Amino acid sequence: MNNYIIDNDLVWIWIFDQHNALYNYNVLNEYPFTLVKTLAGFLKDHGIIIVSASANNEDYPTGFKSWDQLPLYGGYDDKEFNQWYTLNGYSINDPTTMVQLDEVKFWTNAYPLELDILHRTGGNDLLAKTKKYLEY
């Protein structure tokens, strides 16, 4: 397979999500977790390895600290989130809406793209939009 990638000038992308979820256990010394460490030498210039390390970075194996990092989280802070819901016409005077906005913040991680997707989701009110968003 590596020859096929090289001969066709392709890039092989390997994505390991939740790789650090079992950091407390010996499983990191077993396949497929050791695969992440060995792939870099195998792929050379013909591959990219993406490893998620979002949940417990303080305990993440030190062997990956030298790797390039790309933080992908860009969720709104509280002030930005408040601006988002005001600009989109959600009333902070309605207690039901405020409770629903807390749910929205939880399910979207206050990430701008997800908030916009939820806002564009069909429904007459925020509760209906959230329900439909979660169904998707």
Image (spheres, rainbow, N blue to C red):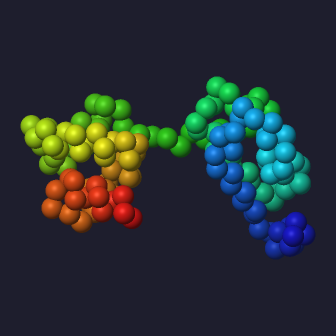
Q: Is residue 63 left or right of residue 50?
A: right
Q: Quadrant of residue 46?
A: bottom right
Q: Residue reaching furthest left? A: 93
The answer to whether any part of residue 136 appears in the image is: yes
Q: Is residue 20 left or right of residue 44?
A: left
User: Eyeballing the image, is 3 above or below 127?
Assistant: below
Q: Residue at x 30, y 35 (%)?
A: 80
In the rendered image, residue 104, in percent from the top left (x then y), is placed at 31, 46
Foreground residue among 109 and 82: 109
In the rendered image, residue 117, in percent from the top left (x then y), is placed at 34, 58
Q: Residue at x 73, y 57 (%)?
A: 14
The answer to whether any part of residue 86 appears in the image is: no
In the rendered image, residue 75, in percent from the top left (x then y), is placed at 41, 40
In the rendered image, residue 72, in percent from the top left (x then y), is placed at 53, 43
Q: Residue at x 69, y 51 (%)?
A: 16
Quadrant including the C terminus: bottom left
Q: Residue at x 24, y 66 (%)?
A: 122
